[in-house]
Amino acid sequence: MNVLSLFDGIACTRVALERAEINVKNYFASEIDKHCIKVANQNYPDIVHLGDINGININNLPKIDLMIGGSPCQDISHAFSGKGLKGSRSSLFHKFVTIKNKINPRFFILENVKSKWRFQMDKAIGVIGIELNSKYFSAQSRPRLYWTNIDFIQPEINNEKNIIDCLEKNVDEKYFLKKNLQEKINISYQRKNSRSIKIEKILTADKTIINDNERQRRIYSIYGKAPTLLARSDTPKILTQKGIRKLTPLECERLQELPDNYASCLSNTQRYKAVGNGFTVSAIEYIIKSRNKLKPMQSGIEF
């Protein structure tokens, strides 16, 4: 299989293809972040890097079987106040569509966040984006839209993997909230007997204790799903027997269903960012395994 991965990040797609037992003949990647490229090269030195998406010469590529990408979401995400599909970053979605239309790959997958621009994206790419949450496959709740000509079905909710299943046994003290701050947090929380397929928030710490936005001050139960990882080093806070702490880089890799220490060649700050920006590997694997069934392209979609 010849693969073209745009906005490749740390090559999560390559991991998914490997787990789906698909033989990759050529893996072409477009990525500009030097830290992500370092991770990709460490794990898959045979990747052919094409550089910036704006400089790709598609005439130099063989027939592409799978084209995949997760175009930048900063301008359309609820986590940012952006300019939509006209923003300098999220407008690269149109570049994905242009390349797809020119090379006509056998399969294509585009991943992005849910947003009010989804219907414009449906019309541009020719298929309706289908929501798929990583909670079906992992310990992380990560709802995403997937535009693809692969006709996958929604999986059953039978995955009981929770945060606790991804935790390291021995965690350095640097990941824990300082004791004097922990003592200021009144936690009256009783562990539930059963696990949850939902995110279980215990409380939100006061801003005088954790000086950050409301989302980053939430503290979660390890017996539920983790919230969506972001591309930042201040990861979700959890309550463990030893106290309140943030997730470690290795635990974030596990939440994304990556191999342990996949991005260990980076500093912790860059490792958090690279992993948080990636795909949940098992979600991509699930879609790829459904590739024997194609959906018809929908021209002239009306809304």
Image: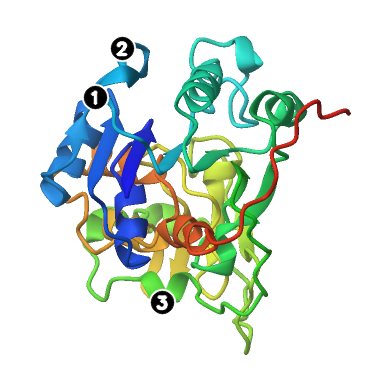
Which residue corresponds to mark 2? Answer: 55
- Residue 60, given in percent of the width and then of the height, sits at 25, 21
Marks 1/3 in contact by CB < 8 Å: the verdict is: no
15 and 241: which is toward the camera: 15
> Which secondary structure, mark 2?
helix
* Frontmost residue, 233 versus 127: 127
Please give left or right for residue 42 compared with residue 149 in the image: left
- Image-based side of 2 in relation to 211, left or right: left
Q: Amino acid at mark 2?
A: Gly
Residue type beneath disc 1: Leu
Q: Could you classify mark 1 by the number of other residues whose Cα lies within 10 Å: few (under 14), some (14-19), or many (20 or more)?
A: some
Q: Are marks 2 and 1 in contact (CB under 8 Å)?
A: yes
Please name the amino acid that badge 3 sits on. Asp
- Residue 276 at what x, y percent from top left? 40, 44
Q: Earlier in the sequence, mark 2 or mark 1?
A: 1
The colour scheme is rainbow
The answer to whether one can see residue 186 in this image is no
Tell me the residue that label 3 is attached to.
165
Callout count: 3
Percent across and percent down for residue 176 are: 33, 58
**Residue at image coords 65%, 31%:** 78
In this image, 142 relative to 301: left or right? left
**Residue that appears at 37% across and 37% down:** 64
Q: Which residue is mark 1?
A: 50
First in sequence, mark 1 or 3: give its number.
Answer: 1
**CA–CA distance between discs 1 and 3?**
37 Å
Q: Residues within 10 Å of mark 3 (few under 14, many from 20)?
A: some
Mark toward the viewer: 1 or 3: 1
Query: Could you give the CA–CA distance between mark 2 and mark 1, rounded to whole angstroms?
Result: 8 Å
